[in-house]
Amino acid sequence: MTDRNNWRPTASLAALESRAQQLAWVRGFFARRNVLEVETPVLGRCSVTDLNIDSVPAYPGSASPSPRCHWLQTSPEYPMKRLLAAGAGDIYQVARVFRDGERGARHNPEFSLLEWYRRGFDDSDLMTEVAELVCGWLQCPDPVTLDYREAFLRFAGVDPLATDDHKIRARCEAWMGQDQLSGMLRDECLDLLMSFCVEPSLAELGPVFITGYPESQAALARVSEVDGVRKAHRFELYVNGLELCNGYWELTDPDEQRARFELDNQARRRAGRPEMPVDEALLAAMHAGVPDCAGVALGLDRLLMLKLGVTDIAEVLAFPSDRA
């Protein structure tokens, strides 16, 4: 039998039953908190500008003389914020999302994302709720909290906020050649150290929130000055070294957001990647008024991997990309 003819799922029926139980857990969790489930389009006119995320293009109406490129969404974040600006209250969504070029034991190009937004919450409030959902489902201890700077000092031997670029690059020479490193930005080097030094060490800590990301990695989060250093109100949750979610006390300033999108596209040009169109509908919604809120995106496939104690995402997917 060739791979093309292999019709069987890669996940066991027991894993599929656990997935159904997970969805029931999630929907019950939010129903008890009066958080409204919503749906937004999988196919959008724009996608993200993030340097590290590649979107999958699609061409609806391709038979027309000038079909316009659309994108399979990498996250429902932008349309959900438009709903918030339109007056929706607390909302959540279980979404199918897509990221090009991501395939491995922890990645599949199409995956399930749980995203939710809570009005009046800051990042600390939302971390508490994330812990209740995740640790309640996994029946594991509550997460500890570790500052990003402290994690790098302890596990990578560099200060991500103070060490100069030359020394940061030199620390990466164990995994990359000089020709590759010379073209990498500081944050790309820090991401490398996070993957090879910090994340494996986090496995020893059980559930752990990483907080206090550098301002340059704020993405869509607010930034504040703490002890003379500007840090993002962003957090990530790792369980046994597996990254589960990324959350923000959301930036609501449209001018600051536009400036960040433009910086993203400058970084994409330097890296030889195509620029992405800026989502003007999101910025218009921010001008209209996205309320004070915090939001988070959580990978449901990875959460299920932890529940079942498996190490390959294919074991929790009916049909991963090579059998889709």
Image (tube, rainbow, N blue to C red):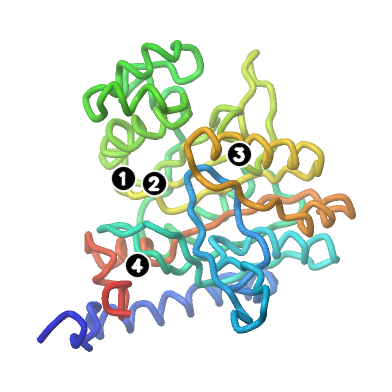
* Location of residue 236 with respect to 174 vertically, above or below: below
CB-based contact (under 8 Å), mark 2 and mark 1: yes
* Location of residue 159 with respect to 57 vertically, above or below: above
Residue beneath the point at 30% across and 57% down: 106
Disc 4 designates what residue? 304
Question: Marks 3 and 2: which is nearer the front?
Answer: 3
Residue at disc 1, secondary structure: loop
Q: Amino acid at mark 3?
A: Asp
Residue at disc 3, secondary structure: helix
Mark-to-mark CA distance, 4 and 3 = 32 Å
Q: Amino acid at mark 2?
A: Tyr
Q: Amino acid at mark 1?
A: Gly
First in residue order: circle 1 vs circle 4 = 1
* Location of residue 222 with respect to 238 vertically, above or below: above
Residue beneath the point at 87% across and 50% down: 287
Q: Which mark is residue 264?
A: 3
CB-based contact (under 8 Å), mark 4 and mark 2: no
Mark-to-mark CA distance, 3 and 2 = 25 Å
Q: Which mark is residue 241?
A: 1
Mark-to-mark CA distance, 3 and 1 = 28 Å
Residue at disc 4, secondary structure: helix
Disc 2 designates what residue? 238
Front-most of 294 and 9? 9
Specify whether residue 37 is in view: no
